[in-house]
Image: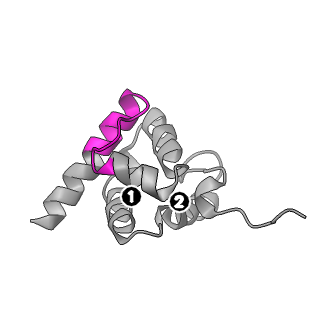
Amino acid sequence: MTDAFTPPHSRPLSFAGEGGGEAQSEVGLNRLRWRCRRGMLELDAALSAFLDRELEYLAPAHRRAFAALLALEDAELLDRVLGHAAPDNADQAWLLARIRAGRDAEGD
């Protein structure tokens, strides 16, 4: 018997503003906010702040890279946010630098 539950961070991701009208964009944004909710408070705060601050300005390649980051397990994602693990590509490196910058600015 298989478990029908799929954790939010492992489901396909759609972004606000990608295909569809305003209502669909709102649904996509709400799903994205849910995917930013993690089991670790540090990740929760950093990802949610990044989303609020920068989502509307992200290029499509950076949106895809953000989706790939959100598909990671919490421990692996935290290692990348903290700089303990290398990103997969330049787009992820750029995103992680922006997430860290926002996290560091909020910590001041």
Three-letter amino acid code at the position of disc 1: Leu
Q: Position of residue 22 (x, y in %)?
A: 58, 59
Question: How many labels sit on residues?
Answer: 2
Q: Secondary structure at mark 2?
A: helix
- Whether 106 is drawn above or below 81: the answer is below
Question: Which residue is rendered at x = 43% and y = 37% of the image?
Answer: 62
Instruction: Name the outermost residue toward the left.
Output: 108
Q: Secondary structure at mark 1?
A: helix
**In-image side of 26 versus 74 (left or right):** right
The residue singled out by tag 2 in the image is 32
**Distance of mark 2 from mark 1, alpha carbons?**
8 Å
Q: Position of residue 17 (x, y in %)?
A: 54, 49
Question: Which residue is rendered at x = 53% and y = 61% of the image?
Answer: 35
Three-letter amino acid code at the position of disc 2: Leu
Q: Position of residue 32 (x, y in %)?
A: 53, 59
Q: Quadrant of the image for the N terminus?
A: bottom right
Magenta stretch in the rendered image? 81-97
Question: Which residue is rendered at x = 30% and y = 44% of the image?
Answer: 84
Q: Which mark is residue 51?
A: 1
